[in-house]
Image (cartoon, rainbow, N blue to C red):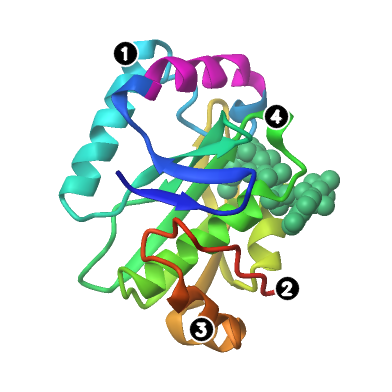
Amino acid sequence: MLTLAIDADITLRMLEIEDADALFRLIDENRRHLREWLPWVDSNATIEDTRMFILSAHEQHTGNLGFQTGVWFRGQIAGVIGFHRIDWQNRNVEIGYWLGAEFQGHGIVTKACRRLVDYAFDEYRLNRVQIRCATENRKSCAIIERLGFNREGLNRQAEYLYDHYVDLYVYGMTAEEWRSRSGGNAAARKNGSPHGNNSSPTERS
Ligand SMILES: CC(C)(COP(=O)(O)OP(=O)(O)OC[C@H]1O[C@@H](n2cnc3c(N)ncnc32)[C@H](O)[C@@H]1OP(=O)(O)O)[C@@H](O)C(=O)NCCC(=O)NCCS
């Protein structure tokens, strides 16, 4: 099972069908919080919908198209972070994430996202990672900028959120840029297992 230990408090682990109840409860308790920026919340209305999400994530992983992990914080499921389907033709991938409201403010997604970017470049050997974020979603934009991504452009009215469209900033990072930013941390990363069980967060900023 794919598990990435980030630090003493945070672990990323591929979602299993047994996680459906806890994951659905987290979504259900956070509908208002998540609806502000995520378009899929209403369509995840029952535990069965959450199971289907987990099953489709397994298919994605089996097809070598990336993976979705649950984010565990001090033993509790706190959210989800993962790759959209990898574009192998162009060696490109996009990352998405969310946390329950009570888990915000600990730097969890900054650390988790950094680990997935490492994974994209070091394990999948991709060339580019993209993250798109609503222009008004300041918390999420701050994460991406903290990680050193370049803001490359803006897609106008690119996402429909229930009753309105939002503009999305497009952020990108290339493998070359990430390696030059990581500097001395590259060796430390190499010493960790590919699945990160003994790796520590690679602090860049
Ligand atoms: C956006 C979202 C994922 C942010 O999660 P988060 O874990 O709080 O984000 P970060 O990892 O960047 O944490 C940042 C906060 O932790 C604090 N922090 C504590 N330790 C930190 C550390 N070691 N590193 C970075 N930040 C740290 C920061 O000061 C910052 O606090 P602030 O928000 O009060 O300024 C979360 O708000 C969310 O799920 N929102 C709804 C869904 C969503 O918008 N998804 C993204 C769509 S593009």
Tell whether 93 sits left or right of 174. Answer: left
Q: CA distance from mark 4 to mark 1?
A: 23 Å
Closer to the observer: label 2 or label 3? Answer: 3
Crowd band around label 4 with a 10 angstrom C-alpha radius: few (<14), some (14–19), many (20+): some
Question: Looking at the image, which is closer to me, 64 or 140?
Answer: 64
Label 4 or label 1, whichever comes before in sequence order: 1
User: Looking at the picture, does residue 70 appear above or below residue 31?
Assistant: below
Task: Say what secondary structure mark 2 lies in.
Answer: loop
Question: What amino acid does circle 4 point to?
Answer: Ala
Q: Is mark 4 within 8 Å of ligand 1?
A: yes
Asked if residue 12 lies left or right of residue 122, the reply is right
Q: Are marks 4 and 1 in contact (CB under 8 Å)?
A: no
Q: Which residue is mark 1?
A: 48
Furthest residue to the left? 63
Could you tell me the amino acid type at mark 2? Ser
Looking at the image, tell me whether mark 4 or mark 3 is earlier in sequence order: 4
Residue 205, disc = 2
Q: Residue at x 39, y 23 (%)?
A: 19
Gap in angstroms between the C-alphas marked 2 and 1? 41 Å
Distance from disc 2 to disc 3, alpha carbons, whole Å, reads 17 Å
Residue labelled 3 has its Cβ within 8 Å of some atom of ligand 1: no
Magenta range: 19-32
Question: Where is residue 75 shown, x and y percent of the image?
Answer: 57, 31
Measured Cα–Cα span from mark 4 to mark 3: 35 Å
User: Which residue, given by chain and number where applicable, does mark 3 sit on?
Assistant: 187
In the picture, which quadrant includes the C terminus? bottom right
Distance (Cα) linking label 4 and label 2: 25 Å
Q: Residue at x 49, y 32 (%)?
A: 39
* Quarter of the rendering containing residue 163: top right
